[in-house]
Image: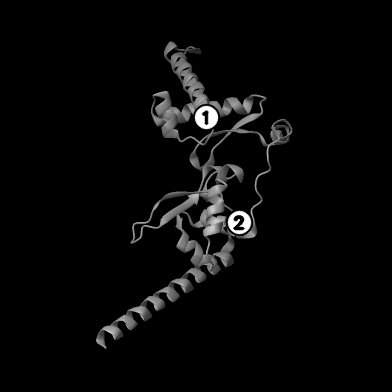
Amino acid sequence: MEMNGQISFADEEEIRQLRQYANAAEAVLFSFGRAVGLSEIARACGCDQKTAKESMALLIERYEEMDTGLCIKEPDGKYRLCTKEEYYPNLINVLKLERKPVLSEVVMETLAIIAYKSPVTKAEIERIRGVKSDHAVNKLIEYGLVEETGRLSVPGRPALFAPTDEFYSRFDISNKADLPSPGPDVSAEIDEEVRAELKSFEESEGSQDKEETTEVGA
């Protein structure tokens, strides 16, 4: 609180504490080496999420003001300590990093479906693509771009897949809402393909039930 142009001792103490939280959050981001959620930062600092968010705002501002090779990004509402893109060549020169795998058209198509429709089952991916997608999904998991996030509550409990923090970081996207719009024509085409596949599946199931009924009656 400001009094006669002066900052009170209570305010100074609050600012000092917030800086300490920002330092702790920085240590967490550096040590984890992955995107960290606000709840994890709050738990590490021993404060509530509102205070943790304020400390992260302070830390982000600090990195923006400093002339450094690092920055903080927020993939999908989380925080990650990253190298600034302009310094990627320097890392490659020093560490001789291998180039990231080139994604084939099939793998990119599968990744796009998972990104836009997540969480999504492998069966739904295959209904949209019209072909088996085990290899493409497994490759995306191997590359760290896709992960299993749960199970669908239906018979068989199929796995649900969604993009990882690495996906959002690599493609420089903050969250699902920032994905480029596929456009009305593409969306309508996808919806039509899904409806056609579902209708075909239902007709196939109905035909099978009818055959079983006939066999029982015979």
Classify residue 67 by image quadrant: top right
Which quadrant: the N terminus? top left
Q: Which residue is mark 2?
A: 108
Q: Residue at x 55, y 43 (%)?
A: 166
Tag 2 near tag 1, CB within 8 Å: no
Classify residue 38 by image quadrant: top left
Nearest to N terminus: mark 2 or mark 1: 1
Of badges 2 and 1, the one in the foreground is: 2
Q: Residue at x 36, y 79 (%)?
A: 208
Element type at mark 2: helix
Element type at mark 1: helix
**Amino acid type assigned to the residue bearing label 1 in the image:** Leu
Q: Residues within 10 Å of mark 2 (few under 14, many from 20)?
A: some
Judge left or right: residue 43 versus residue 84.
left
Identify which residue, 34 or 137, lies in the foreground. 137
Residue 186's x, y, as percent? Answer: 58, 65
In the depicted structure, whether residue 104 falls above or below residue 39: below
In the depicted structure, whether residue 43 falls above or below residue 203: above
Q: Which residue is mark 1?
A: 29
Q: Residue at x 45, y 76 (%)?
A: 200
In the depicted structure, whether residue 131 falls above or below residue 101: below
Residue 178's x, y, as percent? Answer: 56, 49
Residue 147's x, y, as percent? Answer: 49, 48
